[in-house]
Image (cartoon, grey):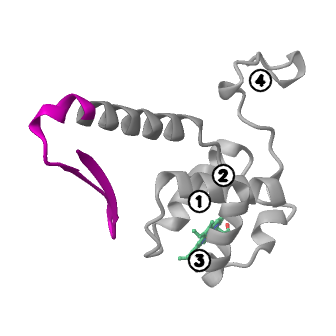
């Protein structure tokens, strides 16, 4: 008999019956498949980004006006992501990668409004968006 019990730090799987080890494998297989699906499909979440940003110390050094000033430095979604990573490195926040991306999504939605990255959609950039020939 296999029992799964919630623990403080995750789940504990008991297997008292050696004959049931294939059942055990099936349970583990389904659980790891679910984890894979979750990490592959999780899109950046600006609502979570807003919460993280509000709870952070991001505004210790500058206000939100740096995001919308006319001469702002960040000119693309990629630059926004690297700037958030640089700034976050000054804080003891220890955001995970997906949390950084949530904050980037929030700042982009609220202030920067860059188009979503074309890489995810497989879309070919429109002719007007291609960089000018040197
Ligand atoms: C230790 C001080 C400090 C902290 C803390 C900090 N920043 Fe910054 N941030 C800066 C400085 C300095 C600049 C550049 C400002 C300038 O050019 O006038 C900057 C610029 C930025 C920019 C670019 C603004 C532009 O011009 O487009 C973004 C975006 C940004 N920070 C986001 C964040 C986020 C998100 C956090 C929290 C994770 C954060 N910052 C925390 C110092 C900090």
Q: Is residue 112 magenta?
A: no
Report the magenta residues as a range: 1-23
Spatial separation of the CA atoms under disc 3 and disc 1: 12 Å
Q: Is residue 107 visible?
A: yes
Per the image, label 3 sits on a secondary structure element best described as: loop
Read off the residue under disc 4.
131
Q: Is residue 73 visible?
A: no
**Residue drawn at x 73%, y 61% as measured from the top left:** 47
Read off the residue under disc 2.
80
Read off the residue under disc 1.
84
Asked if disc 3 and disc 1 are in contact, CB closer than 8 Å, the reply is no
Q: Neighbour class for label 2 at 10 Å: few (<14), some, many (≥20)? A: many
Q: At which x and y percent is residue 74?
A: 71, 53
Spatial separation of the CA atoms under disc 1 and disc 4: 25 Å
* Ligand 1 within 8 angstroms of badge 3 C-beta: yes
**Residue drawn at x 54%, y 66% as measured from the top left:** 87
* Ligand 1 within 8 angstroms of badge 2 C-beta: yes
Side of 94 where 59 appears, left or right: right
Q: Quadrant of residue 52?
A: bottom right
């Amino acid at each position: 008999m296999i029992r799964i019990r919630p623990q403080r730090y995750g789940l504990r799987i008991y297997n008292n019956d050696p004959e049931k080890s294939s059942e055990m494998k099936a349970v583990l297989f389904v659980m790891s498949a679910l984890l894979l699906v979750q990490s592959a499909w999780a899109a950046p979440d600006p609502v979570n980004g807003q919460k993280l940003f509000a709870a952070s110390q991001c505004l210790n050094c500058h206000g939100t006006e740096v995001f919308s000033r006319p001469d702002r430095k960040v000119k693309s979604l990629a630059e926004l992501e690297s700037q958030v990573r640089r700034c976050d490195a000054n804080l003891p926040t220890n955001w995970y990668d997906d949390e950084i991306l949530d904050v980037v999504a929030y700042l982009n939605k609220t202030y920067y409004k860059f188009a979503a990255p074309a890489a995810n959609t497989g879309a070919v950039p429109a002719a007007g968006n291609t960089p000018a020939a040197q």
